[in-house]
Image: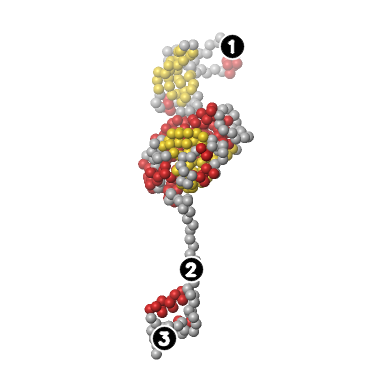
Amino acid sequence: MVETLSQSEIDALLSALNAGGGGGPSESAPSGGGFSAPSGGGGGGGSRGEPEKVQKKGKLYDFKRQTKFSKEQMGTIQLIHETFARLVGTYLSTELRAYAQANIVSVDQLTFEELLRSIYSPTFITGFRSEKLDGKALIDINLNVIFTILDRLLGGNGTPLGTLRQLTEVENQIMQRIMTRILALLREAWINVVDLTPSIEFIDSNPQFAQIVPPGDMVLAVVSEIKIHDVTGLMNLCVPYNTIESVASKLNAASWFAAIRKEPLSTNIKAITHQVRKVDLPFIVELGTATLSLQDILNLQRGDIIVTDRLVKQDLDVRVGNLVKFRGRPGILGKKMALGITQVIENPEEELP
């Protein structure tokens, strides 16, 4: 007589099969009906094995180092600071009249204590505050880079000091001007997310005195490498999460690229205009032209007169580069010769002979 297994016996049998043990009952089942077993519910020819424990892989989670930014937000932060690094490299090249480059090394989130342990002492730390954010942030630059910048600005060839020391008061004043410009570049890089309008709060050389948040608080750490000629050093940007939390929702690629497509940055236009205004161009006032033979030129003596094609009452051409951009009248201002502009030529190309 064939007996049908109870539900509990079926569950026990399936558990044994899944665990890899006690396969006898399925092989001895008769063809005429369901599973059969003695009335005692045994496994049929052998004892049932206990289900083996399946090892599940887990991910360690450090409650002391809780991540605050998502993967997408970290990607957007990477894009923002790649722009910032590029702007810093361009600015230093122009300001120092030397080859300079800045590249992102890493973008990470860690505790403030971990960041401070990674900074050498002495160093050059600039603490700053933004009107649009809560709290402070800081930028740390290696002294090798700082002394190279100072040496170039003070007329040297950019050779860093053999030993690192704290900056003097005069050196601090010079670097404060440089850092004001670098913070303006940081504002330009972040303009699509928030207008930071940062301002310098303090300058220090000891990382332990730059306690802007408790040691265990999470911070955003962006590490860049600055290279000036053969001198390299790191620049660390530290922004506490509590400081940037209010705008964290805007740190996504969609809104960032949408803001880029919307309109050109006014800060970019101002930066380009500022750089172009520094370009030196030849500014030449032509008294007139004349054609002379080589023999006449060789025979010229002091007191000789050359007749040009320009009448005394006619305005003189003023060339900027190779183009006639203005016309004016010669005169005297004090004890110096001068030129009064009488006409601005809007389309210099049309005035070419």
| Left or right placement of residue 258 versus residue 204 in this view | left
Residue placed under numbered mark 2 in the picture: 54
- Horizontal and vertical percent for residue 117? 54, 44
Q: What's the amino acid at mark 2?
A: Val
Where is residue 315, by image quadrant? Answer: top left
- Horizontal and vertical percent for residue 84? 47, 40
* Colouring used for the render: secondary structure
Q: Residue furthest top?
A: 303
Q: Is residue 56 visible?
A: yes
- Horizontal and vertical percent for residue 113? 51, 45
Label 3: element kind: loop
The alpha-carbon separation of the residues under discs 3 and 2 comes to 32 Å
Decide: marks 2, 1 in contact (CB < 8 A)?
A: no
Residue placed under numbered mark 1 in the picture: 301
Query: Tag 3: Cα neighbours inside 10 Å, few (<14), some, or many (≥20)?
Result: few
Label 2: element kind: loop
Residue placed under numbered mark 3 in the picture: 39
Q: Residue furthest bottom?
A: 1
Front in this rendered view, residue 124 or 77: 124
Disc 2 versus disc 1: nearer the observer: 2
In the image, what residue occupies the spot 46% across and 46% down?
A: 217
Front in this rendered view, residue 79 or 243: 243
The alpha-carbon separation of the residues under discs 2 and 1 comes to 107 Å
Q: Earlier in the sequence, mark 3 or mark 2?
A: 3
Is residue 319 shown above or below 196? above
Disc 3 versus disc 1: nearer the observer: 3
